[in-house]
Amino acid sequence: MCNLYRMTKGTAEVARLFEVEGDLAANYAHEVYPGLPGLVVAEGRARAMHWGFPLVLTGKQGQKLKPKPVTNAREDKLLTGFWRDSFVHRRCLVPVSQWAEAEGEKGRMTRTWYGQPDAEVFAVAGLWRPSAEWGDVYTLVMVDGHPQMAEVHDRMPLILSHAAQRYWLEGTPDEALALCRTWEDAITVERTEQLWAGGWQPPEQQSLL
């Protein structure tokens, strides 16, 4: 699953690259963590939304617990109840520069970053919806992992080529499902010594992988 990614370009540049209007007041960090704002392309605009669909669980005594952000949606779960309405009606693009996975021994895991060799920004398939908890929210769609990351994780974000982006946004659900496959070209792999859990701590998250 992906619970950390980078988006290093400004809203105006992303809007130009994706040929949409840009909300120049959008506020987001270059490293995006669950529950925090990220830039999303939806309904002809590049704007900020919170990363993660809110999942409200019930405690042992029947009380409602604090919502958890669900950051990833498996491609084989897109037609299930939690995701179906957003998949059918509200697909989006998430501009990404690199995504990270934790690598190494438990307690000493470091950040390994993945990206595309010739693209500073690429499109990852996403879903979005309004929420009472955090306003408009989004999630990333996951597919089987690339061979170059097999030792680290078996899932990766669904990367969309320029030609595929329109079908993801405007196509039928069947056309969108047909795009759900592992990226076939080479990816970049950048291993670092930065501890996965070091520095700022993301909020507790829940994933449906």
Image (cartoon, rainbow, N blue to C red):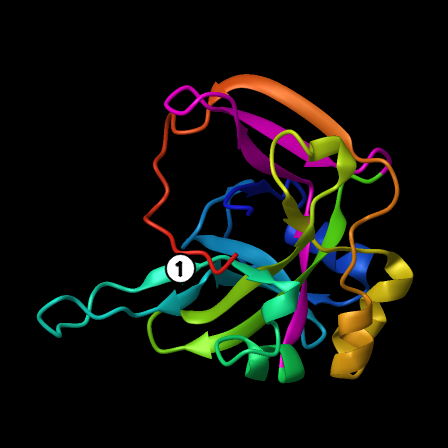
Q: Is residue 105 located in the magenta-colored stretch of the structure?
A: yes
Which contiguous range is marked in magenta? 90-118
SS at mark 1 in the image: strand
Q: Is residue 130 above or below residue 157?
A: below
Locate residue 187, reporting x and y percent.
80, 35
Main SS of the magenta part reads strand
Question: Is residue 5 or residue 19 the one in the foreground?
Answer: 5
How many neighbours does mark 1 have within 10 angstroms: few (below 14), some (14-19), or many (20 or more)? many
Q: Which residue shows up at 59% across the image and 57% down it?
A: 39
Q: Is residue 168 left or right of residue 106?
A: right
Q: Is residue 113 above or below residue 93?
A: above
Q: Is residue 133 left or right of residue 95?
A: left
Locate residue 10, reporting x and y percent.
65, 47
Q: Is residue 147 left or right of residue 154?
A: right
Q: Is residue 55 left or right of residue 126?
A: left
Q: Which residue shows up at 79% across the image and 60% down it?
A: 18
Q: Is residue 77 above or below residue 145?
A: below
Q: Which residue shows up at 64% across the image and 31% down it?
A: 113
Question: Is residue 158 or residue 105 the one in the foreground?
Answer: 105
Mark 1 lies on residue: 69
**Quadrant housing residue 163:** bottom right
Locate residue 197, reporting x and y percent.
39, 29
**Quadrant housing residue 172:** bottom right
The amino acid type of the residue labelled 1 equals Pro
**Quadrant housing residue 61:** bottom left
Q: Is residue 24 visible?
A: no
